[in-house]
Image (tube, grey):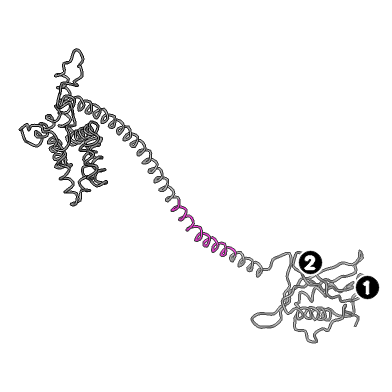
Amino acid sequence: MSLTLQPELDLPKNLEVCYSNDILDWVRKSLPGMRYITLKKVLPGRGKYEQFARINVQESPNPGQVPVEKSDVICDLIYRVLQYKQEEVDDTVNFLIQIYSRTATGDKPSGKHITIGTDSSTGDRETKQYDPETIAPNILDAQMEYIKMIQDNAANLYAMMTGMVQPIIESNKALQSELAAKRKDDYDIKNLEYVYAVRNEERQAALVLEQAKIKANKDKWDGALKMINKNGAFDKLMLQAANKLMGDGSSPVVEPPKKVTQVNQIRKNPLQSVPKAPPKISEEEELAMQKKIIDDSLNTNPLYTYCSYLRDTLETEARENPEENAKKYIEETMRDSLYKDLIDLLNSESEEDAKKNLLQFRNNIDPNDYSDLASIQNVLSETQKTVIGNIMSYDPGE
């Protein structure tokens, strides 16, 4: 036998792979000038092969010289080598069989691509011839299945991403809504702050104006009080006004204090210190004007007027008789906190202030204070008693 195999292989004794008639016919037509046959394994990638065996047929044949071995013997050897390689990897393998024949112009190769594997249904080995330039239908099917799998995966991924993104979008919408509401709340709060600031400024301005009016009225009242007191007529005027407000039309006679020396020397001699009136206004006219001021004050601010009168008479007595006067006796007799409340009441700046201070004074009176208050009555003039009685019986809710 002139056929030799390189390298030498332990080939299977029984051929389990059948070659086709096409392969047999191809080998037969290639016999003239046949020199050798190469067997190659197809590798991944286009045009890549790995030669693993060579069958030498004729060493230096003429172009038409035919080998001794017949075509079927050559095919049998080729397929036993391919079967050996397929059994080695135990998987489907693609092969390239190339026959080199001597021609007048040199060695000319011709090749066939075959696949050797195992039939999944029968378990037998099978071989198929294929054209590498044409994709086999089963490969097309596999590619279609692969494409379909990729499309399904893409669809699933899209659905999954949509499921993940949708809550984020909804959360972002809710967040935007909350931010819009917060911006509106901040705007409303800022607007309220501006409105409050403006109104507070308006209230402050109104308060300053009201305080100015109160001060002007107080100065006017104090001036009238001093003017009338100089004439010694204030006690009588106060009693008349008080009795008028209390519903009594009588005009009681003014009596001096029992324990306190007469504090107002002007009462003993009313005309002694009367200032000269302007040339065009007589003393009677001036006195009448001041009495009208006090009368108006009693009508509009009775509690404030009573408190101002009592404060003025007590301070006048204290200035004229520092050693023995009603104010000193009251301070020594009353509890400190109650005396403070009394002074706050007498120093009230307005009718509303007097009402508030009167409530504080009343609430601070303790049953133990009654004896001290009765003792204080003994050092007051009748007019002072009447006025303080009107103060204590005054209803702040009026």
397 part of magenta stretch: no
Residue 320 picture location, percent across and down: 23, 31
Task: State the image coordinates of residue 211 (x, y, percent, origin top left).
Answer: 28, 32
Image quarter in which the N terminus is found:
bottom right
Q: Residue furthest left?
A: 250
Residue lying at 26% horizontally and 46% vertically, measured from the top left: 336
Density class for disc 1 (Cα within 10 Å; few <14, some 14-19, many ≥20) is some
Q: Quadrant of the C terminus?
A: top left
- The residue indicated by pointer 2 is 48
**Residue 77 % position (x, y):** 83, 80
Q: Is residue 32 left or right of residue 364?
A: right
Q: Picture quarter containing residue 67?
A: bottom right
The answer to whether 16 is drawn above or below residue 194 in the figure is: below
Q: Main secondary structure of the magenta part?
A: helix
172 lies above or below 238: below
Taking the image as shown, residue 327 lies to the left or right of residue 241, namely right
Q: Which residues are magenta?
A: 150-175
Residue 153 magenta = yes
Q: Amino acid at mark 1?
A: Pro
The residue to which callout 1 is attached is 61
Q: Amino acid at mark 2?
A: Lys
